[in-house]
């Protein structure tokens, strides 16, 4: 049986230079495959809004949706470190609400940690959740929940001034008590500076190879998500194309009367058909 990692294990991996590999998952079956593939962590990201529900972004995603999907992922990957993603307005209002919603992930979905977006502005919430006894992962750079303020889904920290802002955000997140940090769509040089300065693990999604580990969206890895492809995405399969091909073949077989074939049907017990026909005649 696969041994589930702990915060201590993840910290040791940073200290020894061993890369952490993790993916998003939103359902039971992808979580099963992720665990079987040996993923160190799984994030039940609010990206489920786009990947599962077809929203234009992550803003409409609710706490209930995130908790439900986290429950399914936990059942599929009981021995993997699972992180629940705090959706928009589940933590921004005040610290009490942030703690309460983080606790829902723990109580209802049995996650190992939660993640929330933002730097210095969410320092109080990170501190409150951590002091309540829960593990918090920070998230800076391209933060989809505030993409409107950022001018869209654009890379961040590309100038000296904006990079310094990110570095200060990273410092604040560690000081607030986060156990790790995710950096999204930031130049590798900036990620390396943050990785070297912070003692907690620093992970990348589109922030280069210098991080302590890499996250990818499962729908991107499998080639399922069709709306757009971010620059940092590498597709390892094209299941979207294969799925479409399979569905077209199925429809064609039905319309051409090639499916179902005899091997796809069930036979009556020998001798029962004549009995049925006799019974039908009697009814007449």
Image (cartoon, rainbow, N blue to C red):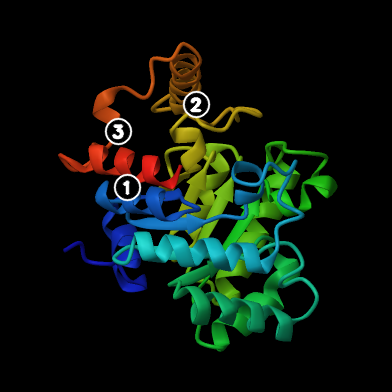
Marks 2/1: CA–CA distance: 17 Å
Q: Residues within 10 Å of mark 2 (few under 14, many from 20)?
A: some
Image: 244 above or below 87: above
Is 33 situated above or below 117?
A: above
Query: Can you tell which mark lies on residue 240?
Result: 2
* Figure check: 232 above or below 95: above
- Residue contact between numbered discs 1 and 3, judged by CB atoms under 8 Å: no
Identify the residue under disc 3.
265
Could you tell me which secondary element the residue under label 2 belongs to? helix
Q: CA distance from mark 1 to mark 3?
A: 30 Å
Q: Is residue 51 visible?
A: yes
Q: Residue at x 68, y 62 (%)?
A: 87
Image x and y of residue 29, in percent: 38, 50
Q: Quadrant of residue 1?
A: bottom left
The nearer-to-camera label among 2 and 3 is 3
Q: Which residue is mark 1?
A: 33
First in residue order: circle 2 vs circle 3: 2
């Amino acid at each position: 049986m696969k041994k589930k990692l702990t915060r201590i294990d993840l910290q040791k991996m940073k200290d020894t230079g061993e890369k952490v590999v993790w993916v998003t998952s939103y359902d039971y079956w992808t979580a099963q495959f992720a665990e079987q593939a040996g993923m160190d962590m799984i994030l039940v990201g609010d990206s489920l809004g786009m990947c599962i529900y077809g929203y234009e972004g992550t803003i409409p995603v609710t706490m209930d949706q995130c908790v439900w999907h986290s429950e399914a992922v936990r059942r599929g990957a009981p021995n993997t470190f699972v992180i629940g993603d705090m959706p928009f307005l589940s933590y921004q209002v005040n610290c009490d609400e942030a703690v309460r919603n983080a606790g829902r992930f723990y109580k209802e979905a049995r996650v190992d940690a939660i993640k929330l977006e933002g730097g210095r502005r969410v320092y109080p919430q990170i501190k409150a959740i951590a002091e309540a006894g829960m593990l918090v992962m920070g998230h800076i750079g391209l933060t989809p929940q505030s993409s409107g303020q950022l001018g869209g889904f654009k890379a961040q920290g590309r100038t000296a001034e904006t990079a310094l802002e990110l570095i200060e955000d990273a410092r604040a997140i560690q000081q607030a008590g986060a156990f790790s940090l995710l950096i999204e769509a930031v130049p590798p040089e900036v990620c390396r500076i943050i990785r070297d300065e912070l003692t907690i693990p620093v992970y990348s999604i589109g922030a280069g190879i210098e991080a302590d580990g890499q996250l990818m969206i499962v729908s991107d890895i499998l080639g399922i998500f069709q709306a757009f492809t971010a620059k940092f995405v590498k597709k390892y399969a094209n299941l979207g194309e294969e799925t479409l091909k399979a569905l077209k073949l199925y429809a064609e077989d039905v319309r051409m009367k090639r499916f179902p074939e005899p091997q796809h049907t069930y036979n009556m017990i020998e001798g029962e058909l004549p009995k049925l026909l006799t019974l039908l005649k009697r009814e007449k």
